[in-house]
Image: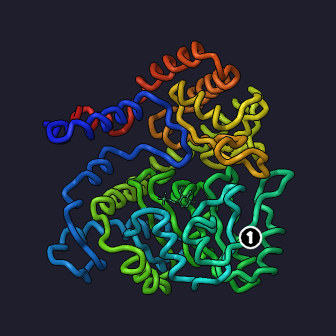
């Protein structure tokens, strides 16, 4: 019985079309992924009915005995997943509704309005919660930034140190949304120590790589770490905060009641399942394949005439400069969209074009790898991307690629295909 269809066909029609879009197209947005059927089921479960303000054992509502179990499972697994380097001295808060909510709680815990913060420039791959002027971080704090070097588009640690010495930030933020190189967190630690700043790492993009021990681990060197759970970590859309136990009290109170009311217990259940999945050996293999796929895709696109910012990738994503093909990022996003390949346009460092039509696109491999695609598929997809981008006005070529994309996708069902089919 499809209750949504029965009760609200308008909403069902949109969900149904989205099921088809996710199955029939190539999802290459670097921050997206497909959850397992188990995670998807948890997020659609009865736990959505439950209020649970507070923390396990100390709630402001009755009837929390079962959701307490769920939250304890999520916290324990998060600690097991990320706490190895801290020998048990680890605190996890699994309640943030999103990455931005986790980040808001960190600001409330470690800085006062008017304090100086130092983060990666949005135009160089940073995130808007790291000091963009229209975000609460930019409104409440004195924001300074560092960037990447012009020559190689890697983080300029001389500039990080210079900015830190000059502005004496209370908080230094490492982590990025569009940076394809491994971030050496120890270098940020040295600079933070020199100027007496708190070091916060927002590992939202590469948390799955850290979980799989396939990326430099920030948990042991940072004072506090935040992440989303829905990108490379492959869980539900949500956030997570990690730190040593000494910050537990202040972080707990900044999440609730600082920036949130009741936690979304259905999503916390999804996080518990996702952390359990990431603890399995198969997750390490998955992440290794994500990285390998990204490397091969980048090589294929470079051979075909595109420019990869920084010359390559160490992680799950790449920033592509499409201007050598005589088009901008907006056209590239639209052309690929017409072919069933979903990406997002993106500014590249030192971009001379505008945010609504920048020079680049950002492309990632986490979602395709979840479907079981490997390097052979990356070479094929790379060739299709090049063919369509080199013929931006050739609707027949796009239609042809669209058909090939559909055929490829039919051989790689999404993880929740069975669950989705039950609804259809
Ligand atoms: N931090 C980083 C580095 C991100 O890339 C993102 C999302 O793209 C976020 C935080 C925010 O996450 P959310 O969209 O869940 O608020």
Q: Nearer the viewer, residue 239 or 389?
A: 389
Instruction: State the residue at coordinates (57%, 19%).
Output: 398
Instruction: State the residue at coordinates (71%, 46%).
Output: 354
Q: Nearer the viewer, residue 267 or 378?
A: 267
Residue 292 in sight: no
Question: Left or right: 355 with respect to 65?
Answer: right
Q: Horizontal and vertical percent for residue 322? A: 72, 35
Q: Horizontal and vertical percent for residue 311? A: 77, 43
In which quadrant of the rendered image does the N terminus lie? top left
Q: Horizontal and vertical percent for residue 315? A: 63, 49
Instruction: State the residue at coordinates (36%, 38%).
Output: 415
Q: Horizontal and vertical percent for residue 299? A: 71, 34
Above or below, 273 against 408 in this view is below
In which quadrant of the rendered image does the C terminus lie? top left
Above or below, 142 against 177 in this view is below
Question: Left or right: 19 with respect to 379?
Answer: left
Instruction: State the residue at coordinates (33%, 56%).
Output: 270
């Amino acid at each position: 019985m499809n209750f949504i269809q029965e009760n609200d066909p308008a909403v069902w029609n949109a969900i149904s079309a989205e099921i088809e879009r996710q199955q029939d197209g190539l999802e290459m947005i670097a921050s997206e992924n497909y959850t397992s059927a188990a995670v998807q089921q948890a997020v659609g479960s009865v736990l959505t009915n439950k209020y649970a303000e507070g923390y396990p054992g100390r709630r402001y509502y009755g009837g929390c005995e079962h959701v307490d179990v769920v939250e304890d499972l999520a916290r324990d697994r998060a600690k097991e997943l990320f706490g190895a380097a801290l020998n048990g001295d680890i605190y996890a808060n699994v309640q943030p509704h999103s990455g931005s909510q986790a980040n808001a709680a960190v600001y409330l815990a470690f800085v006062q309005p008017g304090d100086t913060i130092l983060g990666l420039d949005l135009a160089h791959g940073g995130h808007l919660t790291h000091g963009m002027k229209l975000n609460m971080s930019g409104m409440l704090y004195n924001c300074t930034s560092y960037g990447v070097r012009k020559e190689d588009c890697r983080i300029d640690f001389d500039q990080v140190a210079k900015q830190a010495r000059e502005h004496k930030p209370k908080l230094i933020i490492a982590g990025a949304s569009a940076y394809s190189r491994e971030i050496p967190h120890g270098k940020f630690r040295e600079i933070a120590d020199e100027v007496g700043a708190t070091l916060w790492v927002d590992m939202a993009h590469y948390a799955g790589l850290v979980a799989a021990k396939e990326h430099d681990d920030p948990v042991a060197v940072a004072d506090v770490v935040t992440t989303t759970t829905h990108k490379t970590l492959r869980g539900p859309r949500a956030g997570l905060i990690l730190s040593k136990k000494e910050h537990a009290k202040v972080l707990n109170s900044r999440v609730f009641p600082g920036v949130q009311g009741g936690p979304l217990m259905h999503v916390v259940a999804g996080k518990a399942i996702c952390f359990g999945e990431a603890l399995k050996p198969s997750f390490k293999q998955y992440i290794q394949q994500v990285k390998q796929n990204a490397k091969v895709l980048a090589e294929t696109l470079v051979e075909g005439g595109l420019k990869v910012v920084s010359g390559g990738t160490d992680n799950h994503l790449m920033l592509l400069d499409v201007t050598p093909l005589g088009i901008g990022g907006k056209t590239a996003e639209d052309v690929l969209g017409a072919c069933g390949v979903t990406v997002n346009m993106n500014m590249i460092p030192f971009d001379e074009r505008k945010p609504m039509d920048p020079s680049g696109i950002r492309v990632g491999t986490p979602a395709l790898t979840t479907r079981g695609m490997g390097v052979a598929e990356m070479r094929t997809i790379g060739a299709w991307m090049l063919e369509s981008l080199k013929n931006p006005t050739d609707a027949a070529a796009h239609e042809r690629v669209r058909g090939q994309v559909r055929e490829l996708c039919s051989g790689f069902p999404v993880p929740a295909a069975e669950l989705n089919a039950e609804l259809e």
